[in-house]
Image: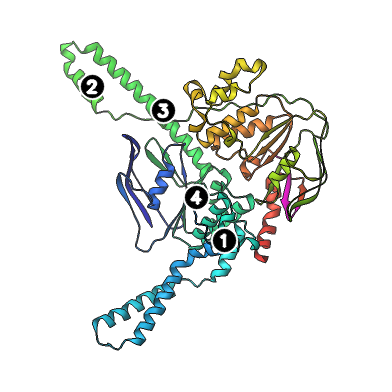
Amino acid sequence: MLSADGLTVEFSGKTLFQDISFVINEKDRIALMGKNGAGKSTLLKILAGVREPNKGKVSFPKGTVVAYLPQHLLTEDSRTVFEEAALAFSAISEMEKEIEALNVELTERTDFESDSYMELIEKVSALSEQFYSIEEINFDADIEKTLLGLGFTRDDFQRNTSEFSGGWRMRIELAKILLRRPDVILLDEPTNHLDIESIQWLEDFLINTAKAVVVISHDRAFVDNITTRTIEVTMGRIYDYKAKYSHYLELRKERREQQQKQYDEQQKMIAETTEFIERFKGTYSKTLQVQSRVKMLEKLVLVEVDEEDTSRLRLKFPPAPRSGNYPVTAENVGKCYGDKRIFGNVNFMIERGEKIAFVGKNGEGKSTLVKAIMSEIEHEGILRLGHNVKIGYFAQNQASLLDENLTVYQTIDDIAVGDIRTKIKDLLGAFMFGGEESFKKVKVLSGGERTRLALLKLLLEPVNLLILDEPTNHLDMKTKDILKQALVDFDGTLITVSHDRDFLDGLVTKVFEFGGGKVVEHKEDIYGFLAKKKLENLREIERK
């Protein structure tokens, strides 16, 4: 269906990848993996046709529709959500209009014998054949179903796109891609701005409806659920596995072990050969043997071991000071913004040591309740903090609140007090900011690096109630695993807002569900909760 042949990309004399080739077949669902900077997003852009390789080409049969969702995008603000989504069918609508116009022209013309009249008939016939071969679609119903699945409400359909955040606009673009029913869908971090329910809907669509899919994602559960093939970009080349992500990790480990064994054997042979050459290079009787071995070494193709990211974040929260039995208690808590009620009549008691997830669709009040607990906003009812509660807070925008003009070292130096000041360099090293990295300005850091720095600030004083709002955004899988383990080991109370199911699995034992102006407590882990909700949500979408 789509073929990549001999692709090479170079940046400033450095080769990102060289002479890579692969084929994407119908019904392939591919995870594009590799460490940050390996060239995954660049490769996706080349497949999408939005940038050119230095060498090589991408080819596909005529009429193949390739759709691409980048990490960052721009949309116009002149249309409603529904009108913007309907643009997915603009090509079909234009084709229908063109057929109608040509038919009118045929009825009005009288030069029946002319070549141009015959050409017009052929054009109408070809267009009509193409138009009627398209599967009949109830456009409005399809748009509604897709928008509802991605988290929009019917009230949103007639709102202008300018009223929505970048994350919601990304959903509109995603809806347009899905509605087009393309032959190949290319997605770069599609789950970054989706809630759990929307991610599940997208999974079902990609598995059951989509044709070929290539996705870059740090969401392990999403990748594992939808993909059947993994292409790893590493050290300028690719490895293609007919396996989903979790199985690919096992195969990659085996591959590297084999490479290491081959490398060690070759290095031993080189050492022995070099020793022979040095010992006998002045010996006449051994001249031919020495020359033979020299030539052999010159022609030797060296075994390479795939690079392994050995940098490792070491994360451990300080011991939590003992708090009261109930760190947070809510009595008839509610919040309105103007005429819009976010939630009301919320009642709960969080026990010391509990680890809780706040889940639900975007806009249902998860972050609002967090802000209320933090006393950052006014609210109805009573929110009471228990005895000796010390809060550590990580907001969604925490990383963006860092002073961009400070260095990494200055950021920590400015807030560190007491004995911890003697350990700043050790702390920075543990967070992969050792050596020269500590002198980087915040403004040049990536999203993941900023998040790590914001998490480090959180560790500088002992707390017993951690409140984390989307802490895994911009973190790679390995760093997420390390953060998760640190939170599992944390001996205080945890409230986390997250849409990352893999991150929540094994971490939280209770779920607070936000939706319809209510907050419902579920005494189950995340997958127990989702299993129960999945059928309910699918039925609900069908009813809307």
Q: Of the residues shown, which amino acid type is indicated by label 1?
A: Val
Q: Which residue is label 2 attached to?
A: 293
Q: Alpha-carbon distance for marks 2 and 4?
A: 46 Å
SS state under label 2: helix
Q: Alpha-carbon distance for marks 2 and 3?
A: 22 Å
The answer to whether residue 494 is seen in the rendering is yes
Q: Which residue is label 4 attached to?
A: 228
- Between 33 and 109, the one nearer to me in the picture: 109
Q: Residue at x 38, y 57 (%)?
A: 1
- Label located before the other in sequence (1 or 4): 1
Q: Which residues are magenta?
A: 508-517
* Pointers 1 and 2 in contact (C-beta within 8 Å): no
Q: Residues within 10 Å of mark 4 (few under 14, many from 20)?
A: some
Q: Alpha-carbon distance for marks 1 and 2?
A: 72 Å
Q: Residue at x 53, y 69 (%)?
A: 139
Left or right: residue 474 compared with residue 359: left
| Quarter of the view holding residue 105 | bottom left
Q: Which residue is label 1 attached to?
A: 81
- In percent of width and height, residue 513 lies at 72, 49
- In percent of width and height, residue 364 lies at 69, 51
Q: Which residue is label 3 attached to?
A: 261
- Label located before the other in sequence (1 or 2): 1
Q: Residues within 10 Å of mark 1 (few under 14, many from 20)?
A: many
Q: Of the residues shown, which amino acid type is indicated by label 2?
A: Arg
Residue 181: in magenta span: no
Q: Main secondary structure of the magenta part?
A: strand
| Quarter of the view holding residue 257 | top left
- Label located before the other in sequence (2 or 4): 4
* Pointers 1 and 4 in contact (C-beta within 8 Å): no
Q: Residues within 10 Å of mark 3 (few under 14, many from 20)?
A: some
